[in-house]
Image (tube, rainbow, N blue to C red):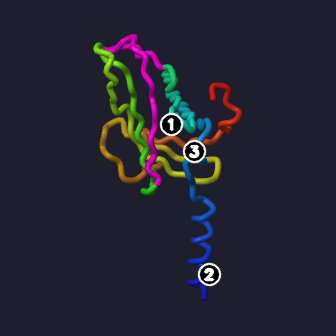
């Protein structure tokens, strides 16, 4: 009986905290273990705005600041694989090369795990280690809280 009750409770809990693409939409903000601030804004058309430390990337209108593509306009979009837990996050940048051909560059990878309706953990894979699980104390792990619903964002 206790075992059935425990299984029932676990099933209800996972149902309550199961998340979808709609749950991710909006602005999320928080800090990593070094108190560095980070924020992500996820839009329904898969554009993403990223703020990490002093860097701001407007996914809908990003001008590349340095390197061989300096000055080119880029678009930054995200893909989330909800079929795995934690969810896999892929962020890609798109820009036109010198011949007006659209180039795609994998910009950033990571993992996302919802820890409540309005809170998630995200671990960014700066070192391209192909992470399989989130390390809550990892140097690139942020705990983010939803600070704005999508309908409240001005650049929707």
Magenta residues (range): 62-82
CA separation, marks 1 and 3? 11 Å
CA separation, marks 3 and 2? 31 Å
Closer to the eye: label 3 or 2: 3
Task: Give x and y (percent) for residue 41.
Answer: 57, 34
Q: Name the N-terminal-most of marks 1 and 3.
A: 3
Quarter the N terminus occupies: bottom right
- Which residue is label 3 attached to? 24
Q: Residue 46 carries which label?
A: 1
Extreme residue in the front direction: 100
Is residue 47 depicted above or below 146 in this figure?
A: above
- Within 10 angstroms of label 3, few (less than 14), some, or many (20 or more) residues? many
Quarter the C terminus occupies: top right
- Which residue is label 2 attached to? 5
The answer to whether residue 54 of the structure is visible from this angle is no
Is residue 113 depicted above or below 42 in this figure?
A: below
In the rendered image, residue 3 lying in the magenta stretch gets the answer no
């Amino acid at each position: 009986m206790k075992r059935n009750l425990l299984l029932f409770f676990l099933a209800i809990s996972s149902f309550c905290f199961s998340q979808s693409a709609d749950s991710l939409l909006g602005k999320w903000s928080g800090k990593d273990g070094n108190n560095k601030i980070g924020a992500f804004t996820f839009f329904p058309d898969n554009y993403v705005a990223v703020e990490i430390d002093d860097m701001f990337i407007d996914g809908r209108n990003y001008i590349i600041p340095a390197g061989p593509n300096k000055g080119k306009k880029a678009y930054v979009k995200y893909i989330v694989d909800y079929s795995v837990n934690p969810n896999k996050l892929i962020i890609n940048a798109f820009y036109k090369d010198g011949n007006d051909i659209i180039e795609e560059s994998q910009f950033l990878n990571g993992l996302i795990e919802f820890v409540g309706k309005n809170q998630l953990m995200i671990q960014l894979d700066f070192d391209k280690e192909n992470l399989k699980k989130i390390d809550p104390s990892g140097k690139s792990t942020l705990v983010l809280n939803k600070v704005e619903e999508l309908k409240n964002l001005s650049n929707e």
